[in-house]
Image (cartoon, rainbow, N blue to C red):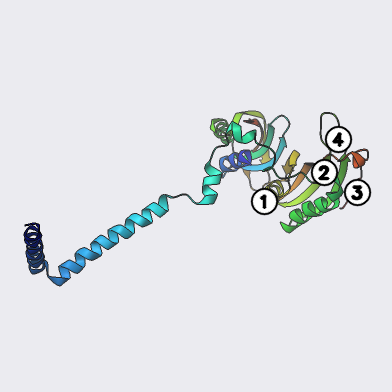
Amino acid sequence: MASLRAIESATVDPVYLLGLSFEPSTGAIKLEAEAPSFEHALAFTQVLADGVTLSTASLASHEQLADQTALRPVVRFTVLTRWNMP
Amino acid sequence: MEHAVNDVWILRLRVWGARTHQRLGWAGLVGIALLIASTVWGTMAWQAHRTPLPDESVSVLPVSSTDAQRPAAAVPELPRQADVALLLTQIQQTVVGQGLAWPTADYKLQSATDTAPAALEVRCNLKGSYPKVRMAIAQLLRGVPGLTIRDLSMSRLNIDVADVDAKLTLVVFLQDEPSAAAESASSGSKP
């Protein structure tokens, strides 16, 4: 629950989470999210890495998408992180 | 002699009282009395404020190593294997009670081994808003003794969709019961 809280507090507009998967046996967490730019994606990753609940956070992939409907740039990205297990 | 000394002190006290009354008047004396009363009341209120409530003291106190080594009397008992139906009902009602859809689930009873206790594994797919999923998980962890999360993933198609599809695998560790331990596996789509 602490790791969920850390992710929730780091996820602020204009970054939106699309997916989240936990592997409790290893503590690994994979996040899929969407942001308007690559810089936003990097900043989100940095906020997670700077927190105390999650030990590491790294940008695993990103993909620039053309959003036809809203005419705005969209970057979908994946962050891998891990919670500090007691 | 002693009687005379006492009379002098009483006389001085009366003189002091009369002078004070002359200077302050009844209004001043009442004001001072109220000031003293409010100071006493404020001190008592502050002391009550500083005293932690029973629940707070429990949650704030760190668990020492000696606490961890105490016998399991304080630890809630694991569910019995005979209570699996009740357990499934409790899990299902917790999830549905949060307004989540519970379309499919698989259940597996794993018998005890040398290294692991008997356990009930529940793989389920949930659908609903993220806060509801979160609340259901928190309630399950609080309400079912021996329940742990083995796997959890949530996803949604895009940011305009409020509901998430959650895949949740729960494991509830059960008491070891030799007679029932040989049995394993029962699965279905609903409890």
Callout 1: chain: B
Residue A60 percent across, percent down from the top left: 67, 28
Outermost residue toward the bottom? B26
Callout 4: chain: B
In the image, what residue type sits under mark 4? Ala
Cα distance, mark 4 to mark 3?
21 Å
Cα distance, mark 2 to mark 3?
11 Å
Instruction: State the residue position of label 3.
Output: B188
Label whose residue precedes the other's in the sequence (4 or 1): 4
Kindly check if marks 3 and 1 are in contact, taking CB atoms under 8 A apart as contact.
no
Label whose residue precedes the other's in the sequence (4 or 3): 4
The local secondary structure at tag 4 comes to loop
Instruction: State the residue position of label 1.
Output: B135
Instruction: State the residue position of label 4.
Output: B112
The local secondary structure at tag 2 comes to strand
Kindly check if marks 4 and 3 are in contact, taking CB atoms under 8 A apart as contact.
no
Residue B185 percent across, percent down from the top left: 92, 41
Task: Please report the residue visible at 16 percent of the width from the left and 71 percent of the height from the top.
Answer: B27
Q: Quadrant of residue A5?
A: top right
Q: Nearer the viewer, residue B58 or A1?
A: B58
Cα distance, mark 2 to mark 4?
19 Å
In the image, what residue type sits under mark 2? Arg
**Would you place residue B67 above or below residue B81 in this image?**
above
Task: Please report the residue visible at 64 percent of the width from the left and 42 percent of the height from the top.
Answer: A1
Residue B95 percent across, percent down from the top left: 75, 53
Callout 2: chain: B
